[in-house]
Image (cartoon, rainbow, N blue to C red):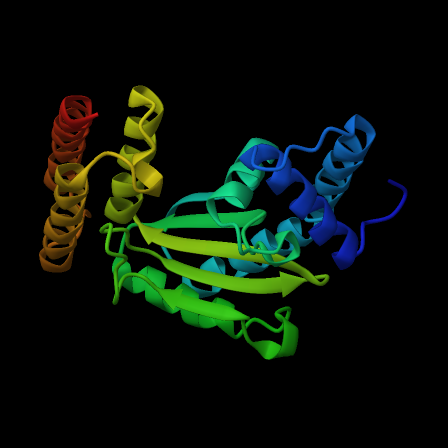
Amino acid sequence: MSSPPTKSQVNKAGKTLRRHLAEAQPVLDRDRLLQAGRVVYAFREAHQSPLVSARTGLASCIRSEQATVLLLTQRLKRLETIFHKLTREPRMALAEMHDIGGCRAVFLHRQDVDEVAVRFSRNSLIRNGRPDRFIDYITSPRSSGYRAVHIHTRYQERFVEVQLRTVLQHAWAIIVEAVTSATSVDVKNGAGGQDVHRYLTQLGTRWAAHEAQLGPATAPERDWMYAALETAAKELTELVTETG
């Protein structure tokens, strides 16, 4: 496509692909299906420049706060993941999917997360001087045990999601993704049984308490974290395999 698709074109393409992927009303018109795919691809690519701007703004905030950042990344959501989310959340309009473009920063300390979150939220590049949505999953964790700060904002009229985590919060999320990949059980999105998710909730609570008390700053703390990661990954994999 020579220019980015309109909002109505994006939502129409999303509906077409959702019907096809859900198999309740498969789209048999191949040309229509291909056109919908092209629209979604163009919509995804239109987030590339806004994503670069968001990362640049986030990096500036990190420097200004002199925060200790361990990881700063950006990514466009894979097409496969976009399609999966369309079927998982049937009421979501594709044009309102806020995390197609995403940045993530992982910090050594909780204080760094808080300070960068405040500064980024006030960043002059953000539309109207404030984010569209600020979600503090550290103060109020998800029922799964997930913790982080999410900031949804817009650059060049495109939504970008910024995730800010401590190193232990990031480790928790990585374990969930790794176990999901290793076992083919979609633990990340709720599969795996009550015992699995009870374990994850307790793990998140336990690590949050540890982090609040000490913080993974010293060499012994790093050794503790690596051992805790290995143990948690092994225990969770075994639990998912048993409950399947």
Quadrant of residue 141 within the rendered picture: bottom left
Q: Residue furthest right?
A: 2
Q: Is residue 49 above or below residue 83?
A: below
Q: Is residue 123 above or below residue 104?
A: below
Q: Residue at x 12, y 28 (%)?
A: 235
Q: Residue at x 57, y 40 (%)?
A: 82
Camera sees residue 138: yes
Location of the C terminus (image quadrant): top left
Q: Is residue 35 above or below residue 13?
A: above
Q: Residue at x 54, y 51 (%)?
A: 99
User: Could you tell me residue 162's position as x and y percent?
Assistant: 49, 56
User: Could you tell me residue 128's position as x and y percent?
Assistant: 63, 78
> Looking at this view, is 157 or 29 the one in front?
29
Quadrant of residue 35 within the rendered picture: top right
User: Could you tell me residue 108's position as x and y percent?
Assistant: 29, 50
Q: Is residue 232 left or right of residue 165?
A: left
User: Could you tell me residue 193's position as x and y percent?
Assistant: 19, 37
> Looking at this view, is 155 or 64 the one in front?
155
Location of the N terminus (image quadrant): top right
Q: Residue furthest front?
A: 24
How many dots with numbers? 0
Quadrant of residue 170 within the rendered picture: top left
